[in-house]
Amino acid sequence: METLPTWRDLLARIIEDPLEKQRIANALGVNPITLVRWARGEASPHPKSLQRLLDAVPHYRASFLPLITEAFEEFSSTPPANVSPIGLSVTLYNHIFHLNSTIPDAQRFWSIGTAVLRGALEQLDPDHAGLQLSIMQCMAPAYGNTVRCLRERLALGTPPWSEEGEHWGGFFGAESLVGYALSTGHQQTIMNINEAPRLPNQLPEHTMSAVASPIWYLSRRAGCFLVVSTQPDYFRQSALLDLIESYTQLLILAFRPEDFYESERIELQVMPSFQIQQSYFSSLQQRIRALLQKATADQRSIGYNVAEQHALWQIEEELLQRKAPSSPER
């Protein structure tokens, strides 16, 4: 391939094919007109978009990279030293899509969620430096009203956190990083918890930096993907943030269509601290048993999942009735 003077010239040549132009635009999440403006020099992409562009045209990467590096001094395609090469593996994609087409709905969340978290943890923390990944799901509205908080559904980590997918399932509201990410619809990052001006609450013990990415499809949102590290500034590389966003998009498949809510139905409230919540969640199994026993006494049949959902609604309402502290504990 002949050497072209600028990256814009190379892009212009590639997008002469209308189908290729549309494909690249879809991969980058931009309008095809935006690609034309980049090629003409009428606009410049964000560094994140440059990385996505390289990923979208692997056959031209070797030609693009030196041209982009020359044009954008601040651009770096090099991932953090402790993170394996950027990009989700074809093997993981194939595994997730196979699960998506074969597993029963009852096993969808656990099976796909666990598979994505394991793949993400292996790539994001290969040296076991200390990372925890959590899937936070919108708490189903009681009586068809609004979503008032999120609930931790699944977590996986490397020491000092659990490696066995254990979680305690607490509630996260407007006071939390995941709550803010869900409400804004954009990925949110805390580089150093000791320097964060806001939202350092409701994060796991040992956390020094964190990223929360909303899980959404079209205009509807199902929850958040939370990644926390024991190291400050762990997420300083835009390439790493892009990788986390890619895993977030893959997690869409773990949810059912009814798990996604329009933004106008999401009105997060402030939840009490983990310490306060713990005393309520300690009675969760007792509440479930009581609901099942009452259903039997009333000659009604309800499953365990239904009883659990009603017990969680009870706890949610009781916690919201409590006056949340002005500065929640961590």
Image (cartoon, rainbow, N blue to C red):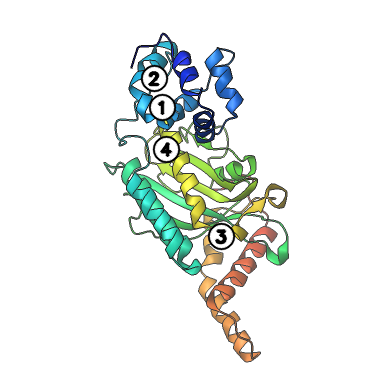
> Which residue is labeled 2 in the image?
64
> Which residue is labeled 4 in the image?
243
**Which SS class for mark 2?**
helix
Q: Pointer 3: residues within 10 angstroms few (<14), some, or many (20+)?
A: few
The image position of residue 185, as x and y in percent, is 61, 41
> Which residue is labeled 3 in the image?
256
Q: Pointer 2: residues within 10 angstroms few (<14), some, or many (20+)?
A: many
Residue 162, relative to residue 219: is it above or below?
below
- The total of numbered circles placed on residues is 4
Residue 242, relative to residue 64: is it above or below?
below
**Which SS class for mark 3?**
loop
Q: Earlier in the sequence, mark 2 or mark 4?
A: 2
Camera sees residue 187 = yes
User: Could you tell me which residue is drawn at 57 percent across and 30 percent down?
Assistant: 30
> Which residue is labeled 1 in the image?
54
| Camera-nearest label, 2 or 3 | 2
Left or right for 67, reference 201:
left
Residue 8, relative to residue 225: is it above or below?
above
User: Which residue type does callout 2 highlight?
Assistant: Phe
User: Which residue type does callout 4 highlight?
Assistant: Leu
Q: Pointer 1: residues within 10 angstroms few (<14), some, or many (20+)?
A: some
User: Could you tell me which residue is drawn at 33 percent across and 42 percent down?
Assistant: 123
Residue 133, relative to residue 73: is it above or below?
below
